[in-house]
Image (tube, rainbow, N blue to C red):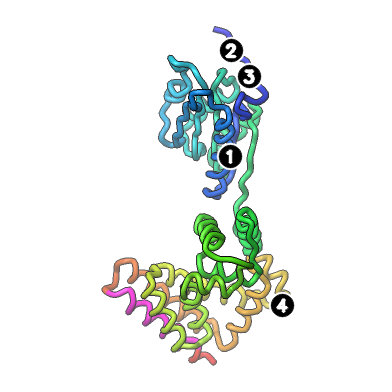
Amino acid sequence: MPAKQQRSGLDAAGRAPVTVIVGEEELLVERAVTVVLSGGSAAADGAGTGPDVHDVRGADLTAGELSLLTAPSLFGGECVVVIRAAQDANAAVAAEIGQLAASMPEEVTLVVTHAGGAKGKVLLAALGKAGATRIDCPSIRRFGERMDFLRAELARAGRKADDRGLRALIDAVGTDLRDLAAACDQLASDTTGVINAQTVARYWRGRAEASGFSVADRALDGNLAEALAQLRWALAIGTAPVLITSALARGIRTLGQVGTARGKGADTLAAELGMPEWKVDKVRQQLRGWSSAGLTRAHSAVAQADAEVKGEGASAGYALERAVRVIVSSRSADR
């Protein structure tokens, strides 16, 4: 039987025969898949029917299954196969995906998502060689990149926020893109005007002030009364104890990183550590009164609290309060 010729161009729905979406940011990858699939919405026939979509994960596919998914239907029509996390497919399945991409059947569209790392790189190369349209979804990790992401999310809703409002939003919600996108949707729907720090604080009713990072900031500043007040409020509004220990550990780790990088300007150090310059300046102020011995004691206290809130202790609240007290006393003892 002669080999099939590789298809080229776009299908009737405006999709490329093969699209590979590369990146680890799940939200961005999901959005890219949605954009590719939505190309078929305007191509539905008069009866309102669309393509037959098979959405599978690479790790779940078995050898030969891909042929069944792309087999012609008795009723005809377009078939779209979405393979998510294709880097997790076994060698046999990866080879089948590459072969399919190189000789796409008529009325079949292939959409593949791939994390883009070393795992499964042979498949990624094969898709590129087959002429797949590539969409990159680079990771968003730096503080400035998250700020840009928030600006873009709000702009999509026709809204704006000042820099302090964006920082407050990250402090209140965290760094997960899905959570940040949802927060932008909520603020766009429920507030008016330019979004600032006061808007964020009012909307979350204390969540911004009572996040795990606020508890960590007060403790590392040596302010026991405020640290305990923020801790109790955070727990009262449902903040997960593990998020608070994580914030405490991150704060101590950041103190150590900034403290060992002497002689570097705030801009250089900010770029190396992936944080804004104002954060570097703030951490340097917190470092006054801390010694390496004090940081070691504080780190041990947080490690113990983390183990207890994950099941080894009877009371997460008690474990966290004890950790906060040790942190503050460790700083005070080294002044």
**Of label 1 and label 4, which has the lower sequence position?**
1
Circles 2 and 3, Cβ within 8 Å, touching? The answer is: no
Q: Mark 4: which amino acid?
A: Gly
1 vs 3, front mark: 1
What quarter of the picture does the C terminus occupy? bottom right
- Front residue of 37 and 108: 37
Q: In the figure, is residue 239 to the left or right of 250?
A: left
State the CA–CA distance, disc 1 to disc 4.
48 Å
State the CA–CA distance, disc 4 to disc 3.
59 Å
* Residue depicted at 48% across the width and 16% down the height: 76
- Front residue of 92 and 234: 234
Q: Mark 3: which amino acid?
A: Gln
* Residue depicted at 49% across the width and 88% down the height: 223
State the CA–CA distance, disc 2 to disc 3.
9 Å
Circles 1 and 4, Cβ within 8 Å, touching? The answer is: no
Position of 227 relative to 238 (above/below): below
**Is residue 326 located in the magenta-colored stretch of the structure?**
yes
**Of label 4 and label 2, which has the lower sequence position?**
2
Q: Which residue is mark 4?
A: 263
Q: Quadrant of residue 124?
A: top right
Q: Which residue is mark 3?
A: 6
Residue 35 percent location from the top left of the image: 58, 39
Mark 3 is surrounded, within 10 Å at the Cα level, by few (under 14), some (14 to 19) or many (20 or more) other residues, namely some
Q: Which residue is mark 2?
A: 3
**Of label 2 and label 1, which has the lower sequence position?**
2
Mark 4 is surrounded, within 10 Å at the Cα level, by few (under 14), some (14 to 19) or many (20 or more) other residues, namely few
State the extent of the magenta-drawn residues as a range. Answer: 315-331
What quarter of the picture does the N terminus occupy? top right
* Residue depicted at 60% across the width and 52% down the height: 139
Q: Mark 2: which amino acid?
A: Ala
